Image (cartoon, grey):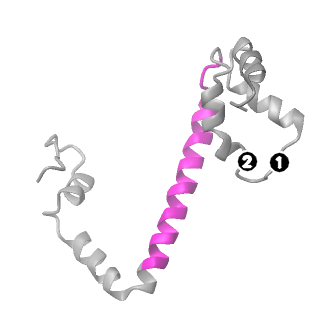
Amino acid sequence: LLQIPEACHVLRDLGVDVLALVDAADIIFERAQEIDYATFMQVVMQMRDSNTATVRDLILQRRYIQSQVDKIGEMFEAICDYSPTLKEKVKRIAKNPSIPAFREAVHPNNTTRLSTRS
């Protein structure tokens, strides 16, 4: 799409954020390699700058993020099942509240900033 300047100009004239549309391609084509023209145009029109997020949009975003987190969790569990050593290390980390990332997750009101420069 970005390689067709005329298409970018037309989309921009319609108020479509072309870069956001390109960034969303993996989500748009997540379930199918191809979509029909009507569906594509519906998605394009949803990407206009003048559109505001609705409660429904936020709910759909939350569901999508949760589905991705669930997939990551399933993959992590599968990896841990494959590696008993890793599984034990993860259990040890979860039991040790002195680990900064774990402490932050357990105590979200802690205002101490963590640094990667330890």
Q: Quadrant of residue 85?
A: bottom left
**Up-down relation of residue 89 to residue 113 (above or below):** below
C-alpha distance separating marks 2 and 1: 7 Å
Magenta stretch: give its range: 51-79
For disc 1, the marked residue is 34
Task: Report the magenta stretch's main SS.
Answer: helix
Determine which quarter of the picture holds residue 19.
Answer: top right
Question: x%, y% of residue 82?
Answer: 45, 85
Q: Identity of the amino acid at label 1? A: Glu
Q: In this view, does 29 lie to the left or right of 76?
A: right
- Position of 82 relative to 39 (above/below): below
Q: Is residue 35 left or right of residue 4?
A: right
The residue to which callout 2 is attached is 29
Q: Where does the image place residue 68, in percent across and percent down from the top left? A: 55, 55
Image quarter of the N terminus: top right
Q: What element carries label 2?
A: loop
Q: Which residue is located at x 65 percent, y 46 percent?
A: 26
Q: How crowded is mark 1: few (under 14 residues within 10 Å), some or many (20 or more)?
A: few
